[in-house]
């Protein structure tokens, strides 16, 4: 997949990690068992012992992970179905590039990625000039110039991450932000821990390093030395990185420096020069997430040999390009990925290129999706559901027995201030100035990354554009942005199992209703609650209310800490806290909203289940999935979302209505006494 060079530095809380393309909702009889298929359930399991297994047990048993995947669940099934539609659109575009500029760009980009013969013939010519330029570096300042240049060219970020984003304490202005980075493995722990899994990954990484250096033309001894240099630098950087839990603290990671003071912190990095070289009009200040990281990076620049840094910079070019080069590069990349993920077979080329086109030209591709697959009436139905959930949330805030009236008032003000974005942008990106060639795949990748980088830095000095989207319409996901106080639902999520025109209210409220509530709750989770209605990072809570919230949140942390996912690996309840709170709050308010429907009030069974039961069955079905152990282990370290089983089970364990619906009693494994359940939102 494409490396996002303008990495989003501000926190956005999304529903889940996977992006899946859109198939479109259909009309169906609500009494048809497609919505709750008993053949997928394991009725031998008591709902109160393992609700997830009760709802999904037979489906999990009968649906192993395909060889070309790392996970297989509801979302992945949709992805496979919908990706065929994506393929159709791309094939059509590739054959009809004369239709218009949009079709030309999409079709030529896709065709260039599918032209394996041309890619093999090109070899490494697309990156040779960059590698040669790095080899000619003569001093440290030239190396720092290269650090800046590679970033503007769309390569993965050497040493630090950089972006132009809204100032969390002045959200009407953009500001340059410099964050910790410079490593390749998914988490700092992979460099630092000595458990068998981490050591196996490090060894595979060293092999991968040597392979790419060798493929780029280095002799074996030099390739080994280059690999060692990269490993030393990345390990040293990893040692001073914040943990993922620390990175979730919006105050700890908010450190504003005058540029002259940042220069004093890092004597070898002249930020005035770096910003000019990165094409940014920086103003007089910059945000830094981890000052100690930059100080250490600066010390390393002064003490490590120049040749080590040249190897490190060449690595930035090689690792960013490997998926788009010749077969030996692609195979080396996949072989290393296998160790991390456990994926047995390479994803088909057409699917990889389709995902890349979506990542590079997503709003152009999104227009084709909307034109062909999106039903306008789905947007209006979604607006109604969002408004219903917002009303439910307000009522719940007013009923809270642990919060003062002053804090409730500010909370309701924030809820009313939500911006709601549904389906697709009102104004599409046109990708002005981006050229796509049918015969230059790696060039297309690089030019698209450069366009994205330039689009980002051009924000500086301009009014904040709140119409922009952080996801493309063909993405099955949703997100909340604290600095914009907005909830966003791309077109792709408006389909089963989340939403279906033909489904009964229990199914839709247990699916898309809980998703809507999830994103709303992100505005009030342990991170989101620290942002005001305007999006500004500021404290709007009384101290007593904040302390009560933290006590309740700690109860959720402890519950998820108790879940063992793999071997002896426990969930990190602090890392996953925001998502777990969003699941709990979202499901609670969705149920409240559902109780106002005609279906709930009439209480008639469908397929043998009451409306309340169907609501919770719908929720649990959404999260069914199988995951290979290697990917699961990686996600436990890196993903702020809990695995599907614990999302399905963890939320309901604190919801009284679930206990009533399934007659969950003391002695059942999931039972929590009422007085010990956590009630927040």
Image: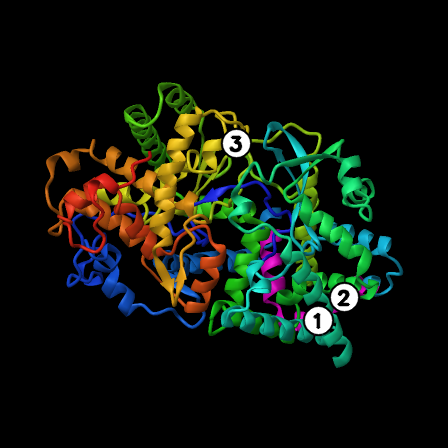
Secondary structure of the residue carrying tag 2 is helix
Query: Does 567 appear above or below 472?
Result: below
Q: Is residue 272 left or right of residue 357?
A: right
Query: Magenta residues: mostly which secondary structure?
Result: helix
Q: Residues within 10 Å of mark 2 (few under 14, many from 20)?
A: many
State the mark number for residue 85: none
Residues tagged 3 and 1 counted as in contact (Cβ below 8 A)? no
Secondary structure of the residue carrying tag 3 is loop
Q: Position of residue 566 (x, y in %)?
A: 38, 65
Query: Does 492 appear above or below 134?
Result: above
Disc 3 vs disc 1: which is toward the camera? 1
Please name whichever residue, 371 or 299, is drawn nearer the observer in this view of the structure. 299
Q: For mark 1, what is the residue?
A: 227
Q: How many marks?
A: 3
Q: CA distance from mark 2 to mark 3?
A: 40 Å
Q: CA distance from mark 1 to mark 2?
A: 8 Å
Q: Is residue 328 left or right of residue 224?
A: left
Disc 2 vs disc 3: which is toward the camera? 2
Q: For mark 2, what is the residue?
A: 311
Residues tagged 2 and 3 counted as in contact (Cβ below 8 A)? no
Can you tell which quarter of the image residue 376 is in?
top left
Upstream in sequence: badge 1 or badge 2 = 1
State the mark number for residue 484: 3
Residue under the image location 13 percent in, 52 percent down:
607
Can you tell which quarter of the image residue 509 is in?
top left
Q: Quadrant of the C terminus?
A: top left
Q: Position of residue 576 (x, y in %)?
A: 43, 49
The magenta region covers 104-132
Please name whichever residue, 288 or 58, is drawn nearer the observer in this view of the structure. 288
Q: CA distance from mark 3 to mark 1?
A: 42 Å
């Amino acid at each position: 997949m494409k490396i996002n060079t303008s990495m989003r530095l501000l926190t956005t809380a999304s529903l889940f990690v996977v992006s899946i393309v859109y198939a479109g909702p259909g009309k169906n009889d609500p009494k048809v068992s497609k919505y709750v298929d008993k053949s997928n359930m394991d009725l031998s399991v008591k709902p109160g012992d393992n609700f997830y297994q009760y709802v999904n047990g037979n489906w999990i048993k009968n649906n192993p992970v395909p060889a070309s995947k790392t996970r297989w669940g509801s979302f992945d099934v949709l992805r496979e179905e919908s990706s065929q539609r994506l393929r159709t659109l791309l094939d059509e575009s590739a054959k009809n590039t004369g239709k218009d500029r949009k079709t030309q760009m999409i079709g030529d980009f896709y065709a260039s990625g599918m032209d394996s013969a041309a890619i093999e013939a090109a070899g490494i010519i697309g990156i040779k000039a960059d590698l040669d330029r790095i080899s000619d570096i003569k001093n440290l300042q030239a190396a720092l110039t290269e650090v800046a240049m590679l970033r503007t060219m769309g390569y993965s970020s050497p040493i630090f991450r950089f972006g132009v984003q809204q100032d969390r304490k002045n959200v009407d202005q953009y500001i340059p932000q410099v964050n910790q980075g410079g490593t390749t493995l998914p988490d700092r722990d992979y460099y630092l821990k000595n458990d068998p899994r981490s050591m196996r990954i490090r060894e595979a990484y060293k092999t991968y390093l040597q392979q790419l250096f060798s493929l780029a033309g280095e002799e074996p001894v030099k390739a080994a030395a280059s690999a060692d240099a990269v490993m030393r630098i990345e390990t040293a950087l990893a040692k001073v990185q914040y943990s993922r839990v620390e990175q979730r603290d919006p105050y700890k990671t908010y450190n504003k420096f005058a540029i002259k003071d940042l220069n004093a912190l890092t004597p070898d990095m002249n930020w005035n020069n770096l910003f000019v070289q990165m094409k940014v009009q920086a103003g007089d200040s910059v945000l830094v997430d981890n000052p100690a990281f930059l100080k250490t990076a600066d010390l390393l620049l002064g003490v490590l040999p120049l040749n080590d840094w040249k190897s490190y910079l060449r690595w930035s070019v090689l690792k960013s390009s490997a998926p788009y080069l010749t077969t030996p590069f692609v195979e080396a990349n996949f072989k290393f990925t296998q160790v991390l993920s456990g994926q047995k077979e390479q994803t088909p080329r057409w699917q990889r290129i389709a995902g890349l086109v979506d990542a590079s030209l997503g709003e152009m591709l999104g227009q084709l999706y909307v034109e062909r697959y999106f039903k306008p009436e789905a947007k209006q139905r979604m607006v109604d559901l969002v408004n219903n959930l917002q009303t439910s949330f307000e009522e719940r805030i007013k009923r809270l027995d642990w919060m003062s009236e002053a804090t409730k008032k500010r909370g309701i003000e924030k809820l009313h201030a939500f911006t709601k974005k549904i389906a697709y942008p009102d104004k599409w990106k046109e990708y002005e100035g981006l050229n796509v060639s049918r015969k230059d795949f790696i060039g297309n990748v690089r030019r698209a990354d450069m366009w994205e980088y330039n689009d980002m830095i051009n924000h500086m000095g301009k009014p904040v554009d709140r119409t922009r989207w952080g996801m493309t319409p063909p993405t099955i996901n949703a997100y909340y942005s604290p600095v914009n106080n907005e909830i966003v639902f791309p077109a792709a999520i408006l389909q089963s199992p989340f939403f279906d025109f033909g489904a009964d209210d229990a199914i839709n409220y247990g699916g898309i209703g809980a998703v809507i509530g999830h994103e709303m709750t992100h505005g009030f989770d342990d991170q989101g609650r620290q942002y005001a209605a305007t999006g500004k990072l500021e404290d709007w809570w009384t101290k007593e209310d904040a302390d009560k919230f933290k006590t309740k949140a700690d109860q959720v942390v402890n519950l998820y800490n108790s879940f063992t996912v793999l071997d002896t690996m426990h969930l990190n309840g602090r890392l996953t806290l925001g998502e777990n709170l969003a699941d709990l709050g979202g499901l609670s308010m969705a149920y409240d909203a559902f109780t106002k429907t005609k279906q709930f009030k009439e209480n008639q069974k469908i397929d043998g289940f009451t409306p309340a039961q169907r609501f919770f069955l719908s929720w649990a079905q959404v999260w069914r999935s199988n995951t290979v152990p290697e990917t699961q282990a990686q996600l436990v370290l890196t993903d702020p979302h809990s695995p599907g089983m614990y999302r399905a089970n963890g939320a309901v364990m604190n919801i009284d209505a679930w206990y009533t619906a399934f007659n969950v009693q003391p002695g059942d494994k999931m039972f929590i006494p009422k007085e010990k359940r956590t009630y927040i939102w």
